[in-house]
Image (cartoon, helix red, strand yellow):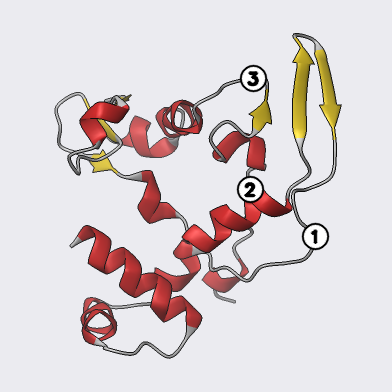
Amino acid sequence: MGFDKKEILLKELPAAAIVKNFIKGHPADCEEYLTDFINSSKMVTKKGNKKFTLRTHSEQSNGQSDIYNSDSSYELDFKILIDPQYMEGKSLLSGSITEIVPGMTAYGKSKVNGKQQACFINWCFRDKSLADLKKIGQSCLPSLPEEKVMVHILETNY
C-alpha cells in the first residue's frame, strides 16, 4: 500500500502567530515568530544548521526576501507561502485577542462573520511539474481558483 500525499495532515497556525499585530495592545512581528519556527525545523538542521536571519522591514522594501541564511545560499519570502485570501480570512474571521495589561487578556468576536474561500499553497503546487507551472504562468485567464493563486505567486516571484 503506497503513501497518498493528498492525505498529509495540515495543522493551521493560529491568527495570533501569523497575522502581524493581531493581539491588540501587544505589538508583535509575526515574521520574527516564523523565522524562529523555520530555524527550529528539519530544513535548517539538514542544511548544516545555518540559521536564517530576518531582514529589517526597510531592507525588504527593495524586493529582498524576508529571511536569509548566514552564507546567503538560501532565501525565503513569507508571502509566497500563503494565499493572500487566506491571510485576509484569518485576520477578519478569527476571534479577537486584546492584552489589557500584561497578564490580563480578553477574547472577543471576529471582525466579521462568515467564511472566505482560500487555497493552501502547498496543495496547489504539490503535484505540478515545471511544464505545468509554465503553462499556468502563461495562461491569460486561469480558470480554477488555485491557478489564480499560482499565477499570482509566479508573477510576484519570477
Instruction: State which tag comes first along the sequence, 2 or 1.
Output: 2
Dot 2: few (<14), some (14–19), or many (≥20) neighbours within 10 Å? Answer: many
Front-lying residue, 55 or 100? 100
Whole-percent x, y for residue 15 in the image: 65, 42
Q: Residue at x 21, y 80 (%)?
A: 134
Whole-percent x, y for residue 127 in the image: 40, 76
User: Of helix, strand and loop, which one carries label 2?
Assistant: helix
Among the 4 quarters of the image, the one containing residue 118? bottom right
Q: Alpha carbon of mark 2 to alpha carbon of mark 1: how far?
A: 12 Å
Instruction: State which tag comes first along the sequence, 1 or 3.
Output: 3
Q: Residue under circle 1?
A: 113
Q: Residue at x 31, y 45 (%)?
A: 77
Q: Residue under circle 2?
A: 91
Q: Residue under circle 3?
A: 26
Check the image and report above or below for 116 versus 38: below
Q: Amino acid at mark 1?
A: Asn
**Residue 26 seen in render:** yes
Dot 3: few (<14), some (14–19), or many (≥20) neighbours within 10 Å? Answer: some
Front-lying residue, 148 or 73? 148
Q: Residue at x 24, y 37 (%)?
A: 61
Q: Residue at x 56, y 72 (%)?
A: 6
Instruction: State which tag comes first along the sequence, 2 or 3.
Output: 3
